[in-house]
Each structure stands twice: as structure tokens, then as C-alpha cells.
Amino acid sequence: MLPSSTPNLDSHSYFHYCHLCKCHPRPKTLYLSPGRPTPNARTIAGTRTGSCSGTAETAFTLLAPYSHVGQTSNTRPTLSWYIPDSEPVEVELRVYAYAANQTLQVPPIHTATLESTSGIMSYPLPIELSPEQTYYWQVALLCNPDQQATDVIAGTEIRVVNPTVDEADRWYDLLGSALPQLDLLMDLAEIEQTAGQEWAEQAESAEGSQKAELETRSIEVLQQSEQLRDVVANE
């Protein structure tokens, strides 16, 4: 029987989960969430999730927080994501600034079109982001350029902070450092799982739009947790 504290995994996935997380000692936590996760952080899934092929064991995944805003002290940070498909497709990256009313400014401040490569992809931003500002970045897999509805899209936020902020709170800086990348991903997966479970519990006593928001964010963040674990298991 699987322990009750594990995510909803089949026996094959649980073997990887057990091996990578619960059943063997892990190094001390490398990444600490900067403050309490907030259910109103902006993230988005596209019209489809998963992969272009629809048959990949692991989903297309941003290597970034969904339960809170990931931080960096680098004004030209590196953004990373995981591509499950071996067949290359066009990848479109977009970075948006926020307007005064907190809506996304259009057009994006930066776009880039790349060719996908299977596994972890990283992209150093060639533009300067402003300190103490939050941005929204989005990656789209253009599975069929003639049919936009087939795009697989994901996005989340990034905030540029002062270098004096504790390094353990700066997700993007840690991911780009010499620290073990898979251990960092497991730290983030556990943070996402905890936040998703808390919001699911809060949704049970909430009402109306708040209940719907908590339920939606809980599902989204728990899915991100599982996908991060899958990335670790497949790397």
C-alpha cells in the first residue's frame, strides 16, 4: 500500500518518487519558498497540456514555481523548461511587463523563437529586467503552426529582487548555479505539493468565487508538483 502522504501516483511512478524523495535520505533543503504561497499568483495553462505527441510519459513543464513568484537578483536571468518530445517543434518564448492596473502589457517586451530539444532547455534573457519589478513569462510549443489550438502553453511570474535577499529564496539564481539541479526540482515539487494540499483543504470551507479560485489553483499547483517529480525521474 502507498503511504497516505504521497501524491496520487501509480506504482511505477511511486517507485521513482520513493527513490528520489521519501524512502532515501535527501540532502538538506536547498530552496526555500520566499514567504507563504499565494493562490492569486498568475499562472496559465494553454488549450492543451502535456506534449505535442500526446504520447510522452512526461509533460511539458516550466522549471519554476506556480504557488508563488520565483525570484532572481539577476536582471538577465535564465529561464528553463522541460521538453518531453524527441521530435523538434518551434518554441516561442514571451516575456511581459505589467501595466499600472496589473494587466499584462501587449506586445511583450521580449519574444524569441527557438527549436525544441528533448529534455531541459534553458534560455538566458538578452534584455535587462528592472529591479523590484515582477514580469510574466510564457512558453508555447507550436505543435502545428497552422493550428493554434494545438499549442501547448504554460506561463508563470518572475520578480527581480535585491541581491541582499537570501540566496535560498531566489529560485532562478539557484537553478542556474552549480547546485544539484534535480535536488532543487524536488525541493520545489514538495513546496508545490504542500501549497496545493493546503488550498484544497481551504476550498472545502470556502464559498463562491473564492472556492472556485482555490480549487483551480490547487489542481494547477498539484499538477505542477507531479510534473516536476516526473522530470526528475526522467533526467
Image (cartoon, grey):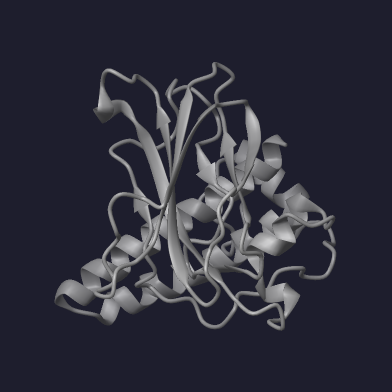
Q: Is residue 175 above or below residue 170?
A: above
- Is residue 133 at all visible to an observer of this figure? yes
Q: Position of residue 78 (x, y in %)?
A: 64, 51
* Front residue (pair 84, 123): 123
Left or right: residue 124 versus residue 184 is: left
- Is residue 15 at all visible to an observer of this figure? no
Name the image quarter holding the C terminus: top right
Q: Residue at x 51, y 82 (%)?
A: 36
Q: Is residue 206 above or below residue 89?
A: below
Instruction: Write down the quadrant of residue 184 in the picture.
Output: bottom right
* Front residue (pair 221, 87): 87
* Front residue (pair 156, 196): 156
Q: Position of residue 100 (x, y in %)?
A: 28, 75
Q: Is residue 144 above or below residue 28?
A: above
Q: Residue at x 46, y 52 (%)?
A: 223
Instruction: Write down the quadrant of residue 216 in the picture.
Output: bottom left
Number of marks in picture: 0
Q: Position of residue 176 (x, y in %)?
A: 73, 54
Q: Position of residue 202 (x, y in %)?
A: 35, 78
Left or right: residue 14 versus residue 137 is: right
Q: Residue furthest left?
A: 208
Q: Residue at x 77, y 68 (%)?
A: 30
